[in-house]
Image: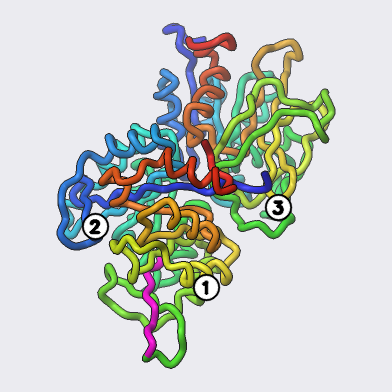
Amino acid sequence: MNGTAIRIIPCLDMKGGRVVKGVRFKNLVDSGDPAELAFRYEEEGADEIALLDISATLEERKTAIEAVRAVRRAVSIPVSVGGGVRSVNDAERLLAAGADRVSVNSAAVRAPGLIAELASRFGVQCVILAIDARARGSAAKVPGYEVLIDAGTTETGIEAADWAARGAELGAGEILLTSMDRDGTGLGYDAGLLRSVVGAVRVPVIASGGAASPEHFLEGAEAGARALLAAGIFHRQELSIGSLKRFLADNQLEVRL
Amino acid sequence: MSGSGKPRVAIAGTGAANLASVEALCLRAGVAAQVSDRAEDIAAADYAILPGVGSFGAAMERLSARGLDVAFRERVAQGRPSMGICLGMQMFCLASEESPGVAGIGVVPARIGKFGNSLPLPQLGWNRVGTGTGAVADASRSRFVKPGWAYFANSYRLAEPPPGFGAAWGVYGETFVAALEYYADPGAARPSLLLCQFHPELSGPWGLDLFSRWIGVKSEEGAA
């Protein structure tokens, strides 16, 4: 083998320290204890655990730190945490609680220097740049993908591939790329979006948004993603990580079995 | 060994991240570890671990500011068990291409360089650790690290083991050193210096097995 295995990463969206499922950011239903879920996913073969804190209030954010601590004790694989990270202090609290990596999204777009600060303080391996993007649409002057922030509610006009390249230059060790067109639809990752960003950076790219079948994960890897992230499909137990990995291995992908 | 019979483990804490993960590893192995930035604590421990993430230069500056470079150098000279993880492994070497002009702890007579191929950087993810022959002469085979999957997060690496060190290998576009073993007592079952480019604390049961065997809470034959 000539490189690392393709990684499968279940993402746990947390609100107030509890995992919620459902279409991201809307119609949330409590799904369970993050540490229990994370433990189960490691047993099933998950390569990493991603925690996304979608808490709205300060109180909810405080419980999220406890959840990070609990997840850290429950698993022996890498844990990344994102959601509302706006400063080096925010990142430090999460890393001290047990996160191995932190991801930044809206705050980084508003103040790109945050990426460089985090990389300088903690190392590029600790910094993930999360990018939410949507296809510009047929009316757009130039085809491409526009970066959205604030949970997909604010348009920036910025091209996803350009932002990814800048982020990597500033010190992001990895890009977490979510298609806002595909997220929650079950129609598969956006291969065009993936290819445009993978082609623009040297750092690994994690595909996110839309995967619902083993074939979708395969397509994500073929589009250049080094890691494949999904949430609801795993939480709802529609697909087991074990059977997914066996399918990928049968299709000549290097996976850790 | 300390009076309770359990090994005293110190983790050098100089502001680098991922301390919580290493602490969790120790907990899992059934030992209480002390995180410390004091040279006397590193010197007194039965086992001392140097973790590290970030850049070589910044980490060495923090380490030497606390005199921990000297503390680890002395441990190695006395054959007292020490472990380096990721950047911690690299810091035991002479220098790194990442931070020209900065001296490492220097007990490993080798220099760290950047991966020289076109694969994504950093190497992030699970890779196989091998201990087989092939390009590796028998004398430099590792005998403590076993083959398995390990988690890596690195852009810099050691390309070749220096003489006197056993090596476990990985392949990331090129062959690189996944772990180094040094035995102050050539007949010992466990290396007095174990340097891991991967993160044993993030490498599942395989990583726990390696660590548990190294700190002596798990025998070579099987479960403790």
Residue at mark 3 to residue at mark 1: CA–CA distance: 25 Å
Residue at image location 49% in from the left, 59% down from the top = A219
Q: Quadrant of residue A149?
A: bottom left
**Label 2 vs label 3: CA separation?**
37 Å
Identify the residue under disc 2.
A54
Identify the residue under disc 3: B115
- The amino acid type, in three-letter code, at marker 3 is Phe
Chain bearing tag 2 is A
Residue marked by disc 1: A196
Residue A136 highlighted magenta (yes or no) = yes
| Residue B40 within the magenta-colored segment of the rendering | no
Report helix, strand or loop for mark 2: loop
The residue closer to the viewer here, A93 or A198, is A198
Chain of residue at mark 1: A
- Residue A28 coordinates in the image, percent (x, y): 16, 55
In the image: residue B182, left or right of residue B39: right
Q: Nearer the viewer, mark 3 or mark 1?
A: 1
**Discs 2, 3 touching: Cβ within 8 Å:** no
Dominant secondary structure (helix, strand or loop) of the stretch shown in magenta = strand
When asked about the image quadrant of residue A107, the answer is: bottom left
Q: In which image quadrant can residue A90 be found?
A: bottom left
Q: Earlier in the sequence, mark 2 or mark 1?
A: 2
Percent x, y for residue A122? 48, 52
Write down the region rendered in magenta.
Answer: A131-138
Residue type for callout 2? Ile
- Residue drawn at (44%, 25%), measured in percent from left and top? B26
At label 1, which amino acid type do we have? Ser
